[in-house]
Image (cartoon, rainbow, N blue to C red):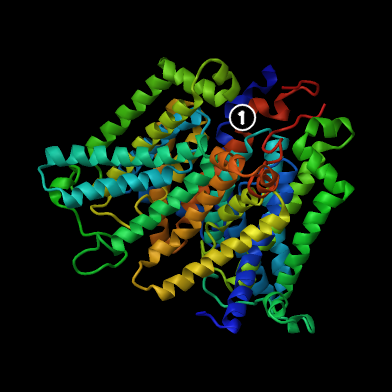
Amino acid sequence: MKSRQWIRWIWPIVPILAALLVTSLLLLLFGASPVTSFDAMLQGAFGDTSKTLSVLAFWVPLLLSATGLLVTFTAGLWNIGIEGQIIMGAIAASWVALKLDAPSAILIPLEILAAMAAGALWAALSAVLKTRGKVHEIFSGLALNNLAIILTNYLISGPWQPPEGGSFRGTEPFQDAALLPLLGESRFSPLSLVIALVAFGMVVVTLRGTLWGLKLKALGKNLRSAFLLGVSSEREMILAMMFCGALAGLGGAVRVLSWFDSLRQSISGGIGFLALLVVMLANYRMFWIPPISFFFSMVLNGAITLQLRTQLHSSLGGILTEMMVLFVVLFGDATKLGIFRKKNDHE
Amino acid sequence: MTMSESQFVLTMASIVFVSMPLIIAVCGEIITERSGIVNLSLDGSMLMAAMTGFVIAYESDNIWAGFLAAMLVGAFFAFIVAFGSIRLRQSQFAIGFVLTLLGDDLSAFLGQNYTRTPGPTVTHFGIPLLKEIPIIGPIFFNQDALVYFTYFLVFFTWFWLFRTQPGLRLRSVGERPEAAFARGVGVNRQRYLYTVIGGALVGLAGAAYSLDVKIGWSDGHIRGMGWIALAIVIFGGWSPIRGALGALLFGATKALASYLQSRFPEVSVVAFNAIPWLLMITVLLLVGSDFTERVILMAPQRMQRPLQRFLRVSPPKALGSTFVED
C-alpha cells in the first residue's frame, strides 16, 4: 500500500486536470486558444471589483442551496426539485415586495420568511408525494420544477406584468425599500452572505452534533435499520425536504432582491442543478461545500465573459464543471476502485 | 360533432407521428431497466444524439449516417452508466444525472453553429394498399419508414422480453440476479449488453426528433422529453406495449391541449404548458399510491385482479442495485 500512497495524494487533482483537458480540446475544435479562453474566464471572474462582487453575489444562493441539499442527501433523498423550490421562494418574495408597502426593516424579513415558507411547502409536496403516493422524488421534483417555471411565466405575462405591457421578460422593478442593502453599485448583498454562512454553520452542527442529524444519517444509510431504530422515516423525510426547501427559497429571495430587482423569466439560472453538482463533488465532506460552490460561481461568471469576448456558447462553463463532477463521481472514490484492491478482496 | 372525419384522421395520424421518438426511447429504456440498470441520462443523451445525428446527416448529406452516429452517442452515454455502476460501483443515479446536465450543455456547445439550419429529413412513404384501409390506413400506414420501424420495435421488444429464452435471461438478471448467476447467467455481461442496446435506441429517438419530427436542431429543443420518457417507462409498467400506449396518450394530451388552446384563446398559453407535468405526477400517483390500492379493494371481487393488472405496476426487483459476481 505504501508505494501507492502518492496516487492517493494526487488523486483529487486528476478530475480537475481531466476536465480542463476535455474543455481545452473542445476549444481547439472551435479554433479558440485554450490559454486565452481560460484567461478570459479568469478576467471575467476577477478582472475588476465589480466582477468579483458578481461572483460573490452568485455564490450566495448557490451556497444556500448546496447547504440545503446537504441535509436531503444525508437523508438519502434526491432533491432534484430544488430548482423549483428556489423559484417558488423568488415568487413569494416578489409577491411581498410588489404587494406590501412598508419600511425595509419590516419588508425584508417578511420577504425572507415568505420565500422560506414557499420553498419549504414546495419541497413538502415532493416529500408527501414520495411517502404517501410512492412517486419517486426525482420525478415529482422535476414536474414541480417545470410547474414553478410555468407559474413564473404566467405571473410575468399576466397578473404581475409591468404597466407598459407584458414582455415576458419580468415584472417592474420593486420599490427600493424591498431590496436587500447592496455593496456600492454591485449586485452583492453582504447581509445575504452572512445569512448563508450562518445557515451553513447551523447545518454542519445539526448534522454532526444532534440526534436529528443522526436520524437522518440512519435514514440515508439504510431505510430498514432506521426503521428498527425507531426513526419515523416519513416524518424525517418530510422535515429534511422542508429544511432544504426553506434554504432554497431563501436563495430564491436573494436572487430577486439582490441579483435582480424584479421577478424574471429565468430567475434561478440553473442554481439548483449546480448546487446538486456541488454536493456530489464534495461527496459528504461538508467543509468543501463553500469553496467548491465559490469555484463554480467563478467558472460560470467567467463563462459569460468568455461568450461576450469570443462568441463561443457560454455552456462551456457548465461543461467544465460537469466534466469535473463526472470524473469525480466515476473515479473519485479511490477505495472503491479496482486499482487499489487486491484480486480476491470483495467489499 | 365538431370535428369532421378527415380532421379526426389527420389529428390521430399526427399524434402517432409526434409520439414516435418517445416510443423508441421508452422501448430502449425498458430494455435497460429490465436488466436492472437505470439509465437516468435520457434527457441529456437524447439532446446529444439529436445534435450529433443532425450535424452528421447535414455534413455527410446522408440521413442514415446521422442515425447511426446518434445511436453510437446514445450507446456511449449508456456505456458510461453501465461501466460506472458495474465496474466502478458508483451510484447509477449520480452518474446518470451528471450525464443529463453534461449532454445538455455539450450539445448546446458542439451544435452552436448548426442551430435553426434546415437539413435532411426522413421522406414520407405511405405503404401501398395498407394505406387505403379506411381510417386505420391513413392513421398508421401513411407515415414514414421510422414510424413503421417503431411498430416493429414495440412488437419485437415485447416478443423478445416475454416470449424468448434470451428475454427470460434478461428479465432474470433484473429480477433475481443471484438466482440467475447461480444458473450460469453472466449477470453483468447481460447488463452491459442491454444497457448499451437500450442506449442506442435512446440515441435513435434523439435523432428521430432532429431528423424527422422536429426537422432540425436548436439547443434544448427537446429538453424534458427524456424525463417524460423515464416517467412513461414507470407508467407503462416496464412493458413495451403499455409504454407505447402511454407515449401515445401523452401525444394525444398535447394535441388536445393545442386544440383547446385554439378554442379558448382567452385562457393563458402557459396554463396548457402545465398539462404534461401535471399528467406526469397524476399517472405516477395512479400506478404507485396506496390510495389506488384501497380503491381497487373496494371494487367487486371479480374485478379486483383485472383492475390490479391494469392499474398497478411493480418495477424489476433488482432495479438500480449492483451485483458482485463471485
Q: Along the line of sight, which residue is nearer the eye, A164 or A318?
A: A164
Q: Along the line of sight, which residue is nearer the eye, B198 or A38?
A: B198
Residue A248 can be seen, yes or no:
no
**Circle 1: element type:** loop
Residue A285 can be seen, yes or no:
yes
A89 shown above or below B273: above
Q: Along the line of sight, which residue is nearer the eye, A287 or A229?
A: A229
Residue A275: percent from the left, percent from the top? 44, 40
* Apparent side of residue A290 relative to residue A184 in the rendered image (left or right): right
Q: Along the line of sight, which residue is nearer the eye, A330 or B182?
A: B182
Write down the chain letter for disc 1: A
* Apparent side of residue B303 relative to residue A30 in the rendered image (left or right): right
Quadrant position of residue B296: top right
Quadrant position of residue B84: top right
Residue B171: percent from the left, percent from the top? 79, 43
Q: For the C terminus of chain B, give its image quadrant.
A: top right
Label 1 Cα neighbours within 10 Å, binned few <14 / some 14-19 / many ≥20: some
The residue pinned by badge 1 equals: A333
Quadrant position of residue A58: top left
A165 shown above or below A112: below
Q: Residue at x 48, y 28 (%)?
A: A234
Residue sticking out furthest to the left: A103
Instruction: Identify residue type, mark 1.
Output: Asp
Q: Residue at x 71, y 42 (%)?
A: B82
Residue A264: percent from the left, percent from the top? 31, 56
How many numbered discs sit on the rendered protein? 1
Q: Residue at x 44, y 48 (%)?
A: A144
Residue A231: percent from the left, percent from the top? 50, 19
